[in-house]
Amino acid sequence: MEPIFRNTSAVDWITLLLFGSLLLIVVAKSLFYGRFLNFVILPFNNKYIFMYNKKEKLMNWFHVFFTLFQIINFSLFIFLASKTLLLQEGGSYPFMYPIILGGLVLFILLKMFLQLGNGFVFGVNKVVGELIFKKLSYLNHSSMVMFLANVVIVYVFKDSEVVVYLSIFLILSINAIGWITVLKNHQKFITANFFYFILYLCALEIAPFIIIGSYLKD
């Protein structure tokens, strides 16, 4: 019997990433089972936000585990989606992933730093902290869609544009629900500080995506 050579190196590192990120969820669920159950139904029930918004917000281990899970899978989803939609022949090249991962981490940290700095300047640290926690919670929840999409794209329907577009729709829908909830819960604050809210929205929410879109277009 002659050995058959199979080139699986491109999939092996993705498998390790997916398995590693899944371990984060297993640990989070094991250590914080009640919090995990409330988190799973987040888009349909605000109980998670109301229960955990006032204490241990950003530095709680459950939140840290899910944020790491989100970063890993968000980066991988961008990697796979760009490979699928842009038809990149070298898209499976693994060294492109660390670049995307590093860029995403830098983007999130810089944006969070600017948001906290903005809250410090205008004396609304508490409100800004709540906004960051709520938005990041919804983004973390959408990372479960990213994880499932990554698994399907890699192992089931390889390089499927339908899966990519459907996943993007679901991710945007979950985060849109989060934004609507945030605006609704802080309606009085936004009305009283409408000018600063518009400044914040344009400078820290819209502008970064315009810059990224312009860069990708070029």
Image: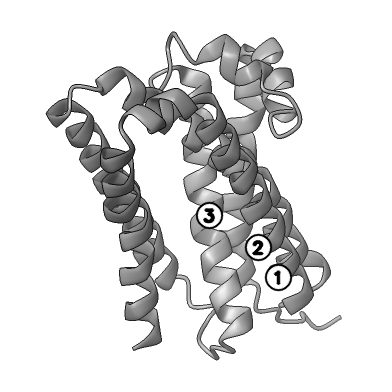
Kindly identify the residue that appears in the image at 13 percent across and 30 percent down: 121
Kindly identify the residue that appears in the image at 64 percent across and 53 percent down: 171
Disc 3 to disc 2, how far (Cα)? 11 Å
Amino acid type, mark 2:
Ile
Q: In this rendered view, identify the residue nearer to me: 113 or 4.
A: 113
Of mark 1 and mark 3, the one earlier in the sequence is 3
Residue 208 visible in rendering: yes
The quadrant of the image that shows the C terminus is bottom left
The quadrant of the image that shows the N terminus is bottom right
Residue 3: where, in percent of width, then height?
Answer: 77, 79
Quarter-of-image position of residue 84:
bottom right
Residue 64: where, in percent of width, then height?
Answer: 45, 28
Residue farthest right in this picture: 1
The residue at which mark 3 appears reads as 74
Disc 2 to disc 1, how far (Cα)? 5 Å
Q: Residues within 10 Å of mark 2 (few under 14, many from 20)?
A: some
Q: Which mark is residue 168?
A: 2
Judge left or right: residue 20 versus residue 157.
left
Residue 158 visible in rendering: no
Report the mark closest to the observer, 1 or 3.
Answer: 1
Disc 1 to disc 3, how far (Cα)? 15 Å
